[in-house]
Amino acid sequence: QQQVKQSPQSLIVQKGGISIINCAYENTAFDYFPWYQQFPGKGPALLIAIRPDVSEKKEGRFTISFNKSAKQFSLHIMDSQPGDSATYFCAAQGGSEKLVFGKGTKLTVNP
Amino acid sequence: GAGVSQSPSNKVTEKGKDVELRCDPISGHTALYWYRQSLGQGLEFLIYFQGNSAPDKSGLPSDRFSAERTGGSVSTLTIQRTQQEDSAVYLCASSSSWKGEQYFGPGTRLTVT
């Protein structure tokens, strides 16, 4: 049973464009939603995270939008750069310590 | 400061052999997690330690997998009688507090031939 569904699997964006990755969850006990960025051969790096008491969180070019009623959250990367090309994972945590991950989105930003 | 470190970075072993994977968490982090990343399954939780105790072992796929943590710091994940389906990247993460942010190490790539 996949508890966090992530889409799209892959995304190609032009430099300067907006990248949008979406995630949906089912477990209403989830109360912490981080996004991780992973480059080939490296471990996932925490990018930005949100808790359900706010609907949006922005850090630099990265924004999380959160819709509690729809049980959805998304990552927006503004002014996407070639250096942003990586795999992005959404995750959720709640009720227990473990993170439940989406399947990942491979982002390619063309110069 | 130093991040989470894991060793070895790569391990090739023959089917049926035992392997040990090591994780050094960020200094002072009380919580430690093991995850497995494989092409077909994505990132899967294996086990969680708070101090030296493992309150959640629910993700360990079989009794061939075990883990321990000593001194509230270093952890070792042991896989006995390795199988080809054990081939994956094994990731360790640590956190400074209960349900705090988890920081990952670079992983150990295990290949079972």
Image (cartoon, coloured by chain):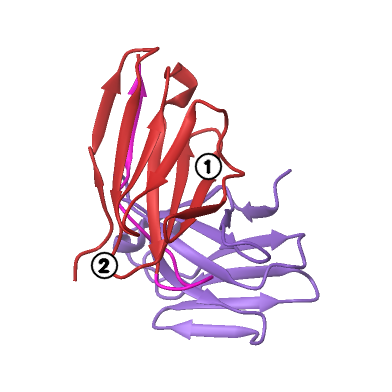
Chain colours: A purple, B red
In-front residue for pair B73/A83: B73
Please give the name of the residue rendered at 22% of the width and 37% of the height, measured from the top-left corner. B8
- Whichever of labels 2 and 1 marks the residue nearer the N terminus, that label is 2
Say which mark, if any, is on residue A7. none
Q: In which quarter of the image is the N terminus of chain B?
A: bottom left
**Residue B65 in the image, given as x and y percentages of width and height:** 48, 31
In-front residue for pair A52/B98: B98
Say which mark, if any, is on residue B27. 2
Please give the name of the residue rendered at 57% of the width and 32% of the height, measured from the top-left corner. B61
**Residue B89 in the image, given as x and y percentages of width and height:** 38, 37
Q: Is residue B102 magenta?
A: yes
Q: What residue type is labelled 2?
A: Ser
**Residue A110 in the image, given as x and y percentages of width and height:** 35, 56
Above or below, A81 relative to B54: below
Q: Residues within 10 Å of mark 2 (few under 14, many from 20)?
A: some
**Residue A89 in the image, given as x and y percentages of width and height:** 50, 56
Please give the name of the residue rendered at 61% of the width and 77% of the height, measured from the top-left corner. A65
Q: Are marks 2 and 1 in contact (CB under 8 Å)?
A: no
In-front residue for pair A12/B11: B11
Residue that protrudes farthest toward the left in the picture: B1
Q: Quadrant of the C terminus of chain B?
A: top left
Please give the name of the residue rendered at 65% of the width and 70% of the height, measured from the top-left corner. A73
* B97 relative position to A64: left or right: left
Q: Quadrant of residue B87?
A: top left
Chain letter of mark 2 equals B
Residue that protrudes farthest toward the right in the picture: A69
**Spatial separation of the CA atoms under disc 2 and disc 1:** 28 Å
Q: Give the range drawn in magenta.
A: B96-112
Does dot 1 land on a helix, a strand or a loop?
strand
Say which mark, if any, is on residue B42. 1
Q: What residue type is labelled 1?
A: Gly
